[in-house]
Amino acid sequence: MISENEINISEKFTLKSEADFEKLFRTYFAELAVYAFRFTEDSENAEEIVQDIFFNIWSKRENLQINISIKSYLYQTVKNSCLNFIKHKKVEDKYKTHFIQQIQYDEINETDLESENLLAEKIQTAIDKMPPARKKVFLMSKIDNLKYKEIAETLGISIKTVENHIGTALKFLREELTDFLPFLIFFLF
């Protein structure tokens, strides 16, 4: 069994054989996993972190220089690895949150675009149902942004006639597009 008196791995305890490594692993794995769990709050990640540490120790065993007790070294390495894991997890969570928000934003925009296209189609269908004179006056007002007086002068009709056409056209659109009334108000004004 490894004791606290084994201060330097390179002097007191060597990992030249699998038996030495297995002894180190069996002695400390469980308590290190419990220690890692305190940081990660996830037993699977805690065990994976400790396994990675032991794997790195085994991989670097010939060049490994430890100037403190093996137990202190293992606990410090676990702590550092856990803190790196937490930092990485926060970045990952932040990215996931941003990614989810972007997807939701794109879905909303796509839905808005579909709604706008559907509304535009419905408005165009309703406008096409209007009598030609009313349709012309309405389009000159809403599409060409002409004032009632300009429309009256262009068409050679009275301003009152233009007002009547616009009023009748808006009433007609409200009736035709009752399901889209909030959007229609925004679209037209």
Image (tube, helix red, strand yellow):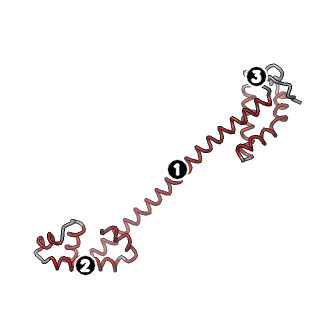
Q: Are marks 1 and 2 in contact (CB under 8 Å)?
A: no
Residue type at the position of mark 3: Asn
What's the CA distance linking mark 3 and mark 2?
90 Å
The quarter of the picture where residue 16 lies is top right
Image quarter in which the N terminus is found: top right
Label 1 or label 2, whichever comes before in sequence order: 1
Residue with the mark numbered 2: 167
Tell me if mark 1 has few (under 14), some (14-19) or many (20+) residues whose alpha carbon lies within 10 angstroms of its own. few
Position in image of residue 39 (x %, y %): 71, 43
Q: Are marks 3 and 1 in contact (CB under 8 Å)?
A: no
Residue with the mark numbered 3: 67
- Furthest residue to the top? 11
Name the foreground residue: 7 vs 62.
7
Residue type at the position of mark 2: Gly
Mark 2 lies on a secondary structure that is helix
Query: Quick check: 48 left or right of 105?
Result: right
Tell me if mark 2 has few (under 14), some (14-19) or many (20+) residues whose alpha carbon lies within 10 angstroms of its own. some
- Furthest residue to the right? 1
Which residue is found at the position 22% from the left and 75% from the top?
135
What's the CA distance linking mark 3 and mark 1?
43 Å
Mark 3 lies on a secondary structure that is loop
Residue with the mark numbered 1: 98
Position in image of residue 185 (x %, y %): 34, 71
